[in-house]
Image (spheres, rainbow, N blue to C red):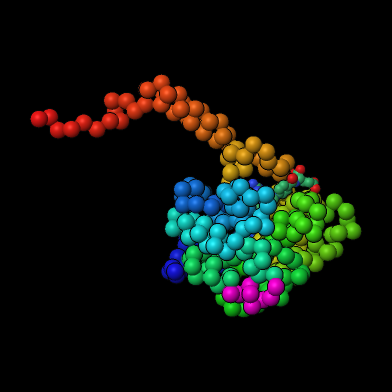
């Protein structure tokens, strides 16, 4: 199946030009219902591969698939009119070669109607980013803590605590910007390093666990809504939807067992005869 590439009010060049202007507001969304809410306030909606963990109950993002990203991407694009929709390239879909990456990135663009793709990797992915950008695929890069590298990096570790790693992280940022990424996510990084990177590259940085020094911020929607019982320190819960959901579901269960629902207002009656 293929869809029209949807035109959104916010464009890739528009986001690119935000550096030095006002901060970029980004959030994840994985479905139409939540995307409609996020679209009213955010500049960027990311259909993250964290969908594998948040919506499918998988233990890591390694189980995300192209099929999953396309299905969720389609739902989000349908419900969005303003924000720029970016879809994560799942583990295994882009690393082996630039050609593989183009085949899968072009499927994400053509089959969902999203405006850009995101992929994890710094210097090692620079050739791939350049290959995609030269062929019409806008790329958001993602460096620092890379969840898809958890098996080689030993879990989710904040980057740059040791200053001897800074040079490598600067090189990752410089090379993705040089390769033509329009924007870069800095994940799990100490504040002064995120600050230096943001000052040295000419594309916007979007931080998650990387301080307010970045050109924008992103969080997983369900984390900031207070729907997950355990969240890392970099998350601020801006709401407590978990308690709202619990209260409503409990009230429903009690109304059903107590035969108080459905009531007069909720039932249909035949015509008077
Ligand atoms: N719901 C959700 N939210 C996320 O932000 C998220 C996902 N899922 N899945 C993919 C990745 C994984 N992420 C994570 C998950 C845990 C930590 C974490 O526990 N961090 C430690 C830091 C440890 C250290 O300092 O080295 C922490 O205590 O914050 C970090 C990033 C971010 N992403
Ligand atoms: C947390 C963001 C940056 C992400 O990559 C995801 O949600 O998959
Ligand atoms: Mg991701």
Give the left or right position of residue 150, taking residue 180 as reference: right
Q: Quadrant of residue 232?
A: top right
Q: Quadrant of the C terminus?
A: top left
Main SS type for the magenta part?
helix
Q: Residue furthest top?
A: 258
**In the rendered view, would you say 202 is above or below 213?**
below
Residue 106 or residue 22, whichever sits in front: 106
Query: Which region is colored magenta?
Result: 96-103
Q: Position of residue 262 (x, y in %)?
A: 34, 28
Q: Quadrant of residue 149?
A: bottom right
Residue 27 or residue 22, whichever sits in front: 27
Q: Residue furthest front?
A: 257
Give the left or right position of residue 261, taking residue 149 as reference: left
**In the rendered view, would you say 28 is above or below 175?**
above
Q: Residue at x 84, y 59 (%)?
A: 166
Give the left or right position of residue 28, taking residue 124 as reference: left
Q: Position of residue 122 (x, y in %)?
A: 74, 66
Residue 23 in view: no
Q: Residue at x 49, y 67 (%)?
A: 111
Q: Position of residue 189 (x, y in %)?
A: 77, 52
Residue 40 or residue 118, whichever sits in front: 118
Q: Position of residue 239 (x, y in %)?
A: 58, 36
């Amino acid at each position: 199946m293929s869809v029209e590439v949807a035109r959104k009010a916010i464009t890739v060049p528009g986001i690119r030009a935000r550096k030095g202007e006002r901060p970029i507001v980004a959030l994840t969304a994985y479905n139409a219902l939540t995307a409609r809410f996020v679209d009213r306030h955010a500049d960027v909606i990311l259909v993250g591969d964290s969908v594998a963990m948040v919506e499918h109950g998988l233990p890591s993002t390694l189980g995300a698939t192209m099929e999953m990203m396309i299905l969720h991407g389609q739902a989000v694009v349908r419900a969005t009119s303003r924000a720029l929709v970016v879809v994560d390239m799942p583990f295994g879909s882009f690393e082996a070669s630039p050609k593989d990456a183009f085949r899968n990135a072009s499927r994400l663009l053509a089959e969902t109607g999203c405006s850009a793709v995101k992929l994890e990797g710094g210097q090692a992915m620079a050739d791939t980013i350049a290959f995609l950008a030269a062929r019409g695929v806008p790329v958001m890069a993602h460096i620092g803590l890379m969840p898809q590298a958890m098996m080689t990096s030993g879990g989710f570790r904040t980057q740059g605590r040791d200053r001897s790693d800074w040079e490598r992280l600067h090189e990752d940022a410089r090379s993705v910007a040089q390769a033509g990424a329009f924007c870069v996510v800095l994940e799990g990084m100490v504040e002064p390093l995120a600050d230096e990177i943001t000052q040295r590259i000419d594309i916007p940085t979007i931080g998650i666990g990387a301080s307010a020094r970045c050109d924008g911020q992103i969080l997983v929607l369900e984390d900031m809504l207070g729907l997950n019982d355990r969240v890392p320190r970099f998350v601020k819960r801006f709401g407590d939807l978990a308690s709202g959901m619990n209260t409503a579901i409990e009230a429903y269960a009690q109304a059903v067992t107590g035969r108080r629902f459905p009531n007069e207002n909720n039932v249909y009656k035949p015509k008077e005869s």
